[in-house]
């Protein structure tokens, strides 16, 4: 059974940084694509960053390009999201997600993902 467990959320002032981590188990990790998504109340879940299975190609939402970095450690079955220069608009529940081998264009599409973590709150104050 696939299990994704996020950690590292919390509260930070605007301009600050946070790193989210996601531990994956029961998952054919090295063959799958993974991503980070976020959601605020009343809004649809938004793709933030995704990383391809082989070669580590990445894809970012325009709103986070240059500020967020997604990475994965295949040896540790871990996924990370380094978030810098945070603004109040980045406040949301953040989710880690995984799927099997994927097309690069689908990395930020939540409907393509089959496994989800429980979510981790990030709050950025002004």
Image (cartoon, helix red, strand yellow):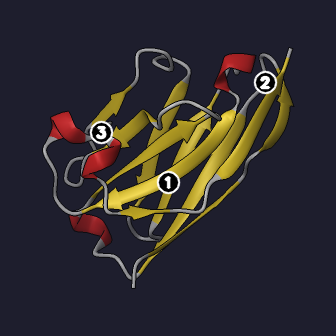
Residue 105 rendering spot, x and y as whole percentages = 17, 34
Secondary structure, mark 3, is loop
- In the displayed image of the protein, which residue is found farthest to the front? 42
**Rounded to the nearest whole Å, what is the CA distance between mark 2 and mark 3?**
27 Å
Residue at 39 percent across and 82 percent down: it is: 26
Q: Nearer the viewer, mark 2 or mark 3?
A: 3
- Which of disc 3 and disc 2 is earlier in sequence? 2
Mark sitting on residue 96 = 1
Point out the tag, 1 or 2, that comes first from the N-terminus.
2
Which quarter of the figure has residue 43? top right
Q: Which residue is mark 2?
A: 16
| Residue 109's disc number | 3
Task: Please tell me how crowded label 2 is: few (under 14), some (14-19), or many (20+) other residues with Cα within 10 Å.
Answer: some
Q: Quadrant of the C terminus?
A: top right
Instruction: Judge left or right: residue 76 versus residue 10.
Output: left
Work out whether residue 5 or residue 69 is closer to the camera in this orientation and state it.
5
Q: Nearer the viewer, mark 1 or mark 3?
A: 3
Q: Rounded to the nearest whole Å, what is the CA distance between mark 1 and mark 3?
A: 13 Å
Taking 100 as reference, is 55 above or below it? above
The residue positioned 41% from the left and 70% from the top of the image is: 75
Q: Nearer the viewer, residue 109 or 76?
A: 109
Give the mark, 1 or 3, whose residue is nearer the N terminus. Answer: 1
Q: Secondary structure at mark 1?
A: strand
- How dense is the environment of label 3, judged by Cα within 10 Å: few (below 14), some, or many (20 and up)? some
Residue 126 shown left or right of residue 66 in the figure:
right
Q: Closer to the camera, 17 or 12?
A: 12
């Amino acid at each position: 059974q696939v299990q994704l467990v996020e950690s590292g959320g919390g509260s930070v002032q605007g301009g600050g940084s946070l790193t989210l981590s996601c531990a994956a188990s029961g998952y054919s990790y090295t063959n799958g694509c993974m991503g980070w998504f976020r959601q605020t109340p009343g809004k649809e879940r938004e793709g933030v960053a995704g990383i391809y299975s082989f070669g580590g190609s990445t894809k970012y939402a325009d709103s986070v390009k240059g500020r967020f970095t997604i990475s994965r450690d295949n040896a540790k079955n871990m996924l990370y999201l380094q978030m810098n220069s945070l603004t109040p608009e980045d406040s949301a529940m953040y989710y880690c997600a995984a799927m099997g081998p994927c097309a690069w264009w689908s990395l930020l599409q939540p409907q393509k993902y089959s496994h989800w973590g429980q979510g981790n709150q990030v709050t950025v104050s002004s």
